[in-house]
Image: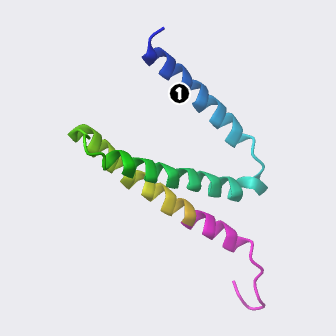
């Protein structure tokens, strides 16, 4: 079995298990789960910055690293904004407020 076949098997298993895990999460736990995935995305930003800044990095590595930095940053920021919006839905409102 080649390394590409092993990588495809690992990807398929991770995708299936991730889908099943998120699908079975109680709605009460969605906010903490989103916060966790935002933290993982922030770790991906740091890793992409480190890879992109390597001295011996090829042009392809730099392009892919830059796109990973941009996309992970967008994902993390939008995730935090969505989480904040969800938490605001649970705040108690005063009289006369909508």
Q: Position of residue 11 (x, y in %)?
A: 53, 27
Identify the residue under disc 1: 11
Q: Quick check: 94 left or right of 11?
A: right
Q: Report the front residue among 55 and 92.
A: 55
| Residue sticking out furthest to the top | 1
Q: Residue at the location (64% across, 53% down)?
A: 36
Q: Report the front residue among 71 and 94.
A: 71
Q: Position of residue 44 (x, y in %)?
A: 48, 48
Instruction: Specify the quadrant of the image occupied by residue 13.
Output: top right
Q: Position of residue 65 (x, y in %)?
A: 33, 46
Residue 14 drawn in magenta: no
Identify whether 68 is placed above or below 10: below
Residue 85 drawn in magenta: yes
Report the quarter where the C terminus lies.
Answer: bottom right
For the magenta stretch, what is the residue range? Answer: 81-98
| Residue sticking out furthest to the front | 55
Identify whether 56 is placed above or below 87: above
Colour scheme = rainbow
| Residue sticking out furthest to the left | 59
Q: Residue at the location (26% across, 45% down)?
A: 55
Q: Report the front residue among 57 and 7.
A: 57
Give the secondary structure at mark 1.
helix
Q: How many marks?
A: 1
Pointer 1: residues within 10 angstroms few (<14), some, or many (20+)?
few
Q: Residue at the location (27% across, 45% down)?
A: 62
Q: Position of residue 71 (x, y in %)?
A: 40, 52
Identify whether 92 is placed above or below 6: below
Instruction: Specify the quadrant of the image occupied by residue 79.
Output: bottom right
Identify whether 85 is placed above or below 21: below
């Amino acid at each position: 079995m080649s390394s590409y076949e092993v990588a495809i098997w690992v990807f398929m298993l991770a995708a299936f298990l991730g889908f099943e895990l998120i699908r079975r999460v109680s709605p009460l736990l969605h906010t903490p789960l989103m916060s966790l995935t935002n933290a993982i995305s922030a770790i991906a930003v740091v890793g992409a910055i480190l890879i992109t800044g390597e001295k011996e990095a090829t042009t392809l590595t730099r392009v892919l690293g830059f796109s990973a930095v941009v996309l992970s940053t967008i994902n993390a920021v939008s995730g935090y904004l969505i989480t904040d919006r969800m938490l605001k839905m649970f705040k108690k409102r005063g009289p006369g407020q909508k």
